[in-house]
Each structure stands twice: as C-alpha cells, then as structure tokens.
C-alpha cells in the first residue's frame, strides 16, 4: 500500500547539507537559529503540501469529499492560506479560530464551527462572517442558535454532533467518541433534537450528522464502525421523520509518527477503507451517497513542523541522569508533560566524531516535570548546540502558554531555500500589552 507523508518522522526535505548541518526546505537549521533566534518553530511547506496531496489523492475516488482542516492543531493566517489554496476548508472551535481564517481570506462558506459550549458572541460572529456549517453539540446550543438566527433573520445550516459510542486506543484525554464523552448528542437524544429542529427551530436547517472518535489513532477499524452508525442513522431519520440528510462528518484523528515505535496508518489505506465502507453502507441502508466531511488536524500539520532549541546548562546527577537543558520546554510544547508524549531530536549543527551519550532533555521552565525527552542518545552536547525536535507542527504552538512569563517563539515557513517569518517572536512589551495598573495604584 502506498505510504503517506504522516508516516514519516521528519519533514520530507530534511537532509544533512554540505556544511554538515541539518537542513529543511533548503534552509540550514543553524543559520535559521542564528537569524531568528531560538526556540523557533519551523514549518516545511513541501511537507505540508505533500500531505494535502495525499488526502486529495486518497479520496479522489469519492468526489463528494470535503476536507476541513481541524485548525485547532495549528491556526495561523499563513498556514490557513496554504491550506485554502490546496482546496481545504476549516474546522474551527472558537471566535479566535474563525477570525484567523477569516483574516487569512478563506472562503467562509467552507468553514465549520464545532464545540461543546459555544457562546452567544461566538455563534453570532459565525453567522455574521458567513460560516458555512455549524455542528450543534447540545440542546442549549440548538435553542441559542435558533434565537440568534431568528434575530438576524437568517437560516443556519447545521450538522448534529453525535456520540457514536466507539472507543479507540489513544490517551484518555484525547478520546471523544465514547459513550460518556462530554461532546455531542447521545444516540438516544438524536430524535428529540431532530424533532425540535423540524417543529420549533424554524431558523435551523439540518444537513447531516457529525462524529469524531479521538486523536492520534492508529487503528483503521474505527472509521468503518463510525460510518456504519452515521449512515444507519441517516436512514433511520429518513424513515421516521421523512428527513433527507445528505452529509456525514467522520471527524479527524489519524495518527502521526512521533518516534520509531509509532506506526500510523497510511492516508491511502484510510481512503480506500472509508470509501469502500461508505459504498457498502449506502447500499445496505438504501440511502443516497452523502457528502463526506473529514476533519484531520494533526496528520495535516504535525510532520511539517520542527522546533529548534539552543542547548544551555547541563547537570550530571552523581550516579544518576545527565540533564541537558534547552531554552524552551513545556510552554512551547506542553505535550510531554500533559500526555507523556514522546519526541525524537537530533543535533542540527555539525557534530562529526562526537561521542554519543544518553541524556534527559529538560526544559527551562520552573517545574521538575518540564522534561521534553526523558531519555535519548545524542552526540555529546555542548552549550550553544542547536537541537531539532521533530513532529512539533500540531498542538505545540496552538497549546503554547506564557508560563513563567516567557515569550512565545517565532515561527518560520521554509521552502526552496527561502525562509519567511509567519509569526513574530513575542516581545517583552507584548507580554504586558494587556495589563492595566488602576489609577489608584499608579501614583
Ligand atoms: N474534529 C474534532 C471534532 C476534534 O475534536 C478534533 C480534535 C479533530 C477534528 C482533529 O483531530 P486530529 O486529526 O488532530 O487528531 N491536544 C491533543 C489533541 C486534542 C484533539 C482534540 N480534538 C494533543 O496534543 O494530542
């Protein structure tokens, strides 16, 4: 079976250049670190476009597929522009994400708004900016959305988010489709929701059903299980209410390769499994071929991204570990401390003939738990060496914080030996930009 870009650990343009340094997108990583400072997020445009092509080719046989990038993985104007150029729409979950893609100039009819507790203001913004679909999660939201739509004299196109009751093997915090999940209508609540829309909420129009099972998934079987339930429900709602729904959204979740141990599925495999199952289910339940929405986030952006750090202090614990500290850590990549996520790193600068040693890569934040890589064998590190941590494109910048009042790193896009800033490094003034000293304290 054809391999896909999410199955690689490193960006596809990664190589060692003539100077003996690591290079990505034709850019020497040591030069990037020097020019832009560290920590630095680097995104390789070729890898990103290669994943987009994987998705498009894998689903080409089903022309009614709509790819909606889950922008929670990394929501940045420049990245949104690339994805929109590649024909992707966007799954958004907040006013901030909606506004970002809007400012990037994407076609808002190709944007979907998800979330289990959307506010009045967020729903209102979504309607004002012309977001194409709202995936309604619960009864409160149905009522609220209808009220807002009514006040604006609009009809809103919605999906119903359902909890299909499927479990997957991933970290408990990133499972969402199991029965006691906080997301979506339980299967037993769908009919009540539909009845409300048909009989009372006249400003809402249902187009289909939406589910999402979890994230960083390696099993391929969850998608057929999910499609079976979604298509069965379409048929059942048609029979019971005469309601013809023609859209299903199977969410995201496809995994990536953080370490050699990880064996994520090929996007091509997923494509054929999904399409085959869809054909079977459509025949079995005698419904029309629905439009198929996909919402991948991590598998789109993770492999394209790396983070560069500068090595600083180190500590050999007598008869214990050797810690090597870098100039970032849990604030720019909270995943190791939140989910025990594992990462692989390499030294970016020339280190020929250096002895190898086992080290713990520690962050610079004031917590013992701020460890990026608990154990890795690397060439003996010196202060000033540049460390490149792979597969940090997804859920790193998007979950970054200013813990310890440290500025968020810059991000550069690399391609064909060119590097461009897409997020400026936060300045010290940015860090206090929203702070106010009340007049009574200002004396
Ligand atoms: N659609 C919905 C409704 C979702 O909740 C998510 C992710 C996605 C799509 C995209 O899933 P992906 O293709 O990226 O797996 N912060 C965690 C991941 C949380 C994912 C939440 N929902 C992490 O760093 O692993």
Image (tube, rainbow, N blue to C red):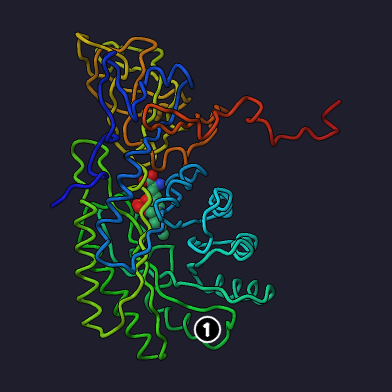
The reply, left or right, for residue 314 in relation to residue 78 is: left
The reply, left or right, for residue 210 in relation to residue 228 is: right
Q: Is residue 104 visible?
A: yes
Q: Quadrant of residue 433?
A: top right
Which residue is depicted at the point 55% across and 54% down?
98
Q: From the viewer's perspective, is residue 45 above or below residue 101? A: above
Which residue is depicted at the point 52% across and 74% down?
139
Which residue is depicted at the point 49% across and 72% down?
158
Q: Quadrant of residue 435?
A: top right
Q: Quadrant of the C terminus?
A: top right
For label 1, count other residues whose C-alpha is less than 10 Å away and answer few (under 14), some (14-19) or many (20+): some
Residue nearest the viewer, comparing 386 with 407: 386
Which residue is depicted at the point 63% across and 75% down?
154
Q: From the viewer's perspective, is residue 204 above or below residue 349? A: below
Q: Residue furthest front?
A: 416
Residue 264 image point, x, y percent:
22, 47
Residue nearest the viewer, comparing 181 with 280: 280
Residue 311 image point, x, y percent:
38, 16
Residue 101 image point, x, y percent:
53, 51
Give the labeled residue for mark 1: 196
Residue 249 image point, x, y percent:
37, 67
């Amino acid at each position: 079976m054809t391999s896909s870009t999410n199955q690689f650990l490193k960006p596809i343009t990664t190589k060692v250049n003539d100077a003996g340094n690591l290079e990505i997108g034709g850019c020497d990583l040591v030069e990037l670190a020097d020019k832009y400072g560290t920590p630095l997020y680097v995104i390789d445009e070729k890898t990103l476009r290669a994943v987009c092509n994987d998705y498009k080719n894998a689903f080409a046989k089903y022309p009614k597929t709509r790819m909606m990038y889950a922008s929670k993985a990394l929501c940045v104007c420049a990245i949104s522009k690339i994805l929109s150029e590649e024909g992707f729409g966007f799954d958004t979950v907040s006013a901030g994400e909606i506004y970002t893609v809007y400012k990037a100039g994407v076609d808002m009819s190709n944007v979907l708004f998800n979330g289990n507790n959307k506010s009045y203001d967020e729903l209102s913004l979504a309607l004002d900016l012309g977001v194409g679909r709202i995936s309604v999660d619960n009864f409160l939201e149905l009522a609220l959305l209808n009220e807002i739509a009514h006040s604006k004299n609009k009809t809103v196109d919605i999906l119903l988010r359902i909890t299909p009751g499927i479990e997957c093997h991933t970290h408990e915090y990133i499972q969402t489709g199991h029965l006691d999940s906080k997301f979506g209508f339980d299967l037993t609540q769908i009919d009540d929701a539909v009845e409300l829309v048909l009989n009372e909420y006249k400003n809402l129009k249902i187009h289909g059903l939406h589910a999402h099972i979890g994230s960083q998934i390696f099993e391929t079987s969850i998608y057929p299980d999910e499609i079976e339930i979604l298509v069965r429900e379409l048929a059942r709602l048609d029979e019971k209410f005469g309601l013809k729904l023609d859209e299903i959204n199977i969410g995201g979740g496809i995994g990536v390769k953080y370490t050699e141990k990880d064996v994520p599925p090929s996007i091509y495999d997923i494509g054929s499994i999904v399409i085959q199952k869809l054909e079977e289910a459509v025949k079995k339940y005698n419904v029309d071929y629905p439009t198929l929405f996909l919402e991948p986030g991590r598998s789109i952006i993770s492999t394209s991204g790396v983070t560069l750090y500068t090595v600083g202090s180190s500590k050999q614990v007598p008869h214990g570990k050797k810690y090597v500290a870098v100039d970032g850590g849990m604030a720019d990549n909270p995943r190791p401390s939140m989910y025990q996520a594992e990462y692989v790193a390499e030294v970016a600068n020339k280190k020929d003939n250096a002895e190898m040693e086992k080290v713990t890569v520690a962050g610079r934040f004031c917590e013992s738990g701020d460890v990026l890589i608990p154990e890795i064998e690397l060439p003996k590190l010196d202060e000033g060496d540049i460390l490149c941590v792979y597969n940090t494109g997804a859920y790193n910048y998007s979950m970054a914080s200013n813990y310890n009042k440290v500025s968020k790193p810059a991000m550069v896009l690399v391609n064909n030996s060119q590097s461009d800033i897409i997020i400026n490094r936060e300045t010290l003034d940015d860090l206090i930009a929203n702070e106010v000293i009340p007049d009574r304290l200002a004396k």
